[in-house]
Amino acid sequence: MRHVALALMAFAWGCDDGGKPAGTEGGPCYPNGSCNAGLACLSKLCVKASGGGSGTGGVSETGGVSGTGGVSGAGGSGGAGGACADPGQSCASQPCCSYAICITPEYRCHTICRSNSDCASGCCEWMADGIRRVCADRATAGQACLWSAPNCCSDTACIQSTNQCHAVCVSNSDCASGCCVQASIHRVCGPVAWCL
């Protein structure tokens, strides 16, 4: 009976809002950064440690990360001999590893993420299906942007007067500067001088 109670407690503790228990494939990693046998903790998710089966499943998108060309998911684990493409590598001739997804038309693997902190770029964007997020090569708050072709992460906006991405805000308390102002179609964090 004690083992059943411990198992139930571990299961209840291990579930996140996605419903997959911690340590299982597709679920969050345990707090110590580990997963169940045969799985590895990558980007805070448990994934198969190495490619095994062929994977071409995915989701065909009509917008999302690429903005104008669309996003197509063709990620999966493994391929012939267990080879798979890591994030940043081409997925034109081999599938992405299970912790990444193939984005077209560039045919490059992108890491599946849950938050901006999971990504080297600092930008975790939703795919158009609203189910998965991937690390995107977008500018974050304080980085340069192009007003004519905005390249800011979705939680920021490109401001023409500064040619920088600024964090989107709702109120002054959302900003380190204490200044949230209306700028074109977004409210953004700006320097104190903008609020005077």
Image: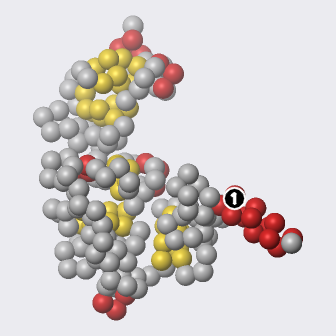
Which residue is farthest top? 196
**Residue at the far bottom in the pictured view:** 81
Task: Locate residue 173, reporting x and y percent.
Answer: 51, 21
154 on left or right of 116: left
Q: Relative to 143, is 5 above or below?
A: below
Identify the image quadrant of residue 50: bottom left
Q: Residue furthest front?
A: 1
Residue at 41% in and 19% down: 180
Colour scheme shown: secondary structure
- Residue under numbered circle 1: 12
Residue 44, given in percent of the width and then of the height, sits at 52, 61
Q: Nearer the viewer, residue 26 or 49?
A: 26
Q: Callout 1: 10 Å neighbours few (<14), some, many (20+)?
A: few
Instruction: From the viewer's perspective, tell me whether residue 89 is left or right of residue 47.
Output: left
Position in image of residue 87 (x %, y %): 33, 67
Residue at disc 1, secondary structure: helix
* Circle 1: residue type: Ala
* Residue 80: % across, % down: 30, 90
* Viewport quadrant of the N terminus: bottom right
| Residue at horizontal 40 percent and vertical 85 percent from the top | 52
Q: Could one spot residue 115 in this view of the protein?
A: yes
Work out whether residue 52 or residue 145 is closer to the camera in this orientation and state it.
52
